[in-house]
Structures are given as structure tokens and as C-alpha cells.
Image: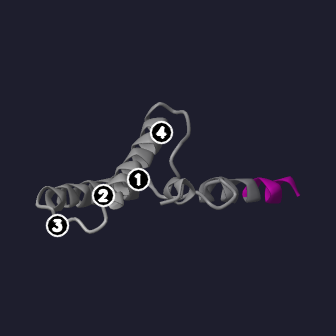
Amino acid sequence: MKTDSLRDMTKEELLQKRDELKEELFNLNMRKSLKELDNPLKLRTIRRDIAKIETILSEDRLSIRGIVDTHVSILGRSDRAESDSEEKKEEDK
């Protein structure tokens, strides 16, 4: 999973994805212990994806880089801020 696609997710989506990956990792480890694992490299991929998500959540917690808010547009401004700036422009006229 690409880091850019993870950074586009909201905090709730990241937490949900992390939980899903942890459950999948648990299931794969169980299959590994039973010698029924088809693709052992899948374990490494999932562990790394979990680490990427944990890093993004940690960056948000430490205010290094924020997580995308659901109300943020592509330009990085919230809908409310855009409407306020439009109102100011109209008042100035």
C-alpha cells in the first residue's frame, strides 16, 4: 500500500484499516504455524503496512504532519473558510 494513499485517509479510516491488517496478520501467523501459508512474503507486506499507518498516526499525534480532515478540499482549505473568504470579497465591493 502506498503511503500517499494512506495519507489521503481520515483518522477513522486509518484506525479501521490498521485493525483489519492486524487481524489479517494474526490469521496469517496462525496459518504459518500450521504450515499452510502459501505466500510468506505477505506477512512482511502486512507488517510494513501496519508500520506505515502507525507512523502516520504518530505524526498526527505529535503534530508533525496532520491527518486529512473530512471537510478539507483539494486545495487544503475547509469549506467554511472558502465561504467566509467569498463573503468578505462581496462585502468589499
Which amino acid lies under the numbered mark 2 shown in the image of this protein?
Leu
Which amino acid lies under the numbered mark 3 shown in the image of this protein?
Glu
Q: CA distance from mark 2 to mark 1?
A: 8 Å
For the point 40% across and 45% down, the residue is: 51
Q: Look at the picture and state if 65 lies above or below 43.
A: above
Q: For mark 3, does the 10 Å Cα neighbourhood hold few (<14), some (14 to 19), or many (20 or more) residues?
A: few
Q: Which residue is mark 4?
A: 60
User: Which callout, 3 or 1, points at the residue further toward the start of the chain?
Assistant: 3
Q: Which residues are magenta?
A: 87-93
Q: Quadrant of the C terminus?
A: bottom right
Which mark lies nearer to you, 3 or 2? Answer: 3
User: Which callout, 3 or 2, points at the residue further toward the start of the chain?
Assistant: 2
Foreground residue, 78 or 86?
78
Q: Point out which mark residue 64 bears.
A: none
- Do tag 2 and tag 4 residues touch (Cβ < 8 Å)? no
The colour scheme used here is: one colour
Which amino acid lies under the numbered mark 1 shown in the image of this protein?
Asp
Q: CA distance from mark 2 to mark 4?
A: 20 Å
Label 2: state its secondary structure: helix
User: Which callout, 2 or 4, points at the residue further toward the start of the chain?
Assistant: 2
Residue 15 drawn at (x, y percent) = 34, 52
Label 3: state its secondary structure: loop
Q: Is residue 64 magenta?
A: no
Q: CA distance from mark 4 to mark 1?
A: 17 Å
Which mark lies nearer to you, 3 or 1? Answer: 3
Residue 65 drawn at (x, y percent) = 56, 39
Q: Which residue is mark 2?
A: 21
Q: Which residue is mark 3?
A: 36
Q: Which residue is mark 1?
A: 49
Which mark lies nearer to you, 4 or 1? Answer: 1
Foreground residue, 32 or 63?
32
